[in-house]
Amino acid sequence: MRQYTEFCRETLFKKKSLSEQAKYLLSCEITTRKAMQCLEPCLQAVVGDFQLPVYCQGDERQTIQKAVLWLKEHALTEH
C-alpha cells in the first residue's frame, strides 16, 4: 500500500513555484468530490480540502488518473 504525505495548505503555499506545488500535491492522496461543470454533474479531483481544476464525467478512478496526469504536466514545467 502506498504511503501518502499528509496534506497541509501551509506546506503547499510555502512552495515557491507551481512545479514544486504540483510535486507536493502528487505526494498526497488525491480523491474526488461531486461537482457541477456546465450544469452537468461530474467529479472533481481534490487533495484534502484543496480543489484541483480537474473535472471528469467518468468514475472516481478516471478522475484521479486525469488529476495525476495534469499534476505531472505541471510538475515538469517551470513557470
Image (tube, rainbow, N blue to C red):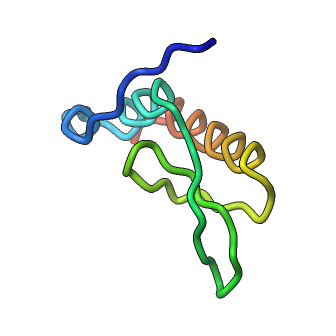
Q: Position of residue 39 (x, y in %)?
A: 65, 87
Say above or below: 41 vs 38: above
In the picture, which quadrant includes the N terminus? top right
Q: Give left or right: position of 10 versus 73.
A: left
Q: Image height check: is 46 above or below 6?
A: below
Residue at left offset 46%, top offset 29% = 28
User: What is the quadrant of the C terminus in the image?
Assistant: top left
The structure residue drawn at horizontal position 78% and vertical position 54%, both measured from the top left corner, is 59
Vertical side of 44 occupied by 61: above or below: above
Kindly indicate the quadrant of the structure image that contains residue 36: bottom right
Q: Residue at x 66, y 43 (%)?
A: 64
The residue sitting at 19% across, 38% down in the picture is 10
Q: Position of residue 19 (x, y in %)?
A: 42, 34
Residue 61: percent from left, percent from top? 75, 43
Q: Quadrant of residue 18?
A: top left
Q: Residue furthest bottom?
A: 39
Compare residues 52 and 77 and report the one nearer the observer: 52
Is 52 on the left-hand or right-hand side of 67?
left
**How many numbered dots are placed on residues in this image?**
0
Residue 65 in picture, x, y percent from top left? 71, 40
Q: Residue 71's image quarter?
A: top right
Above or below, 52 relative to 48: below
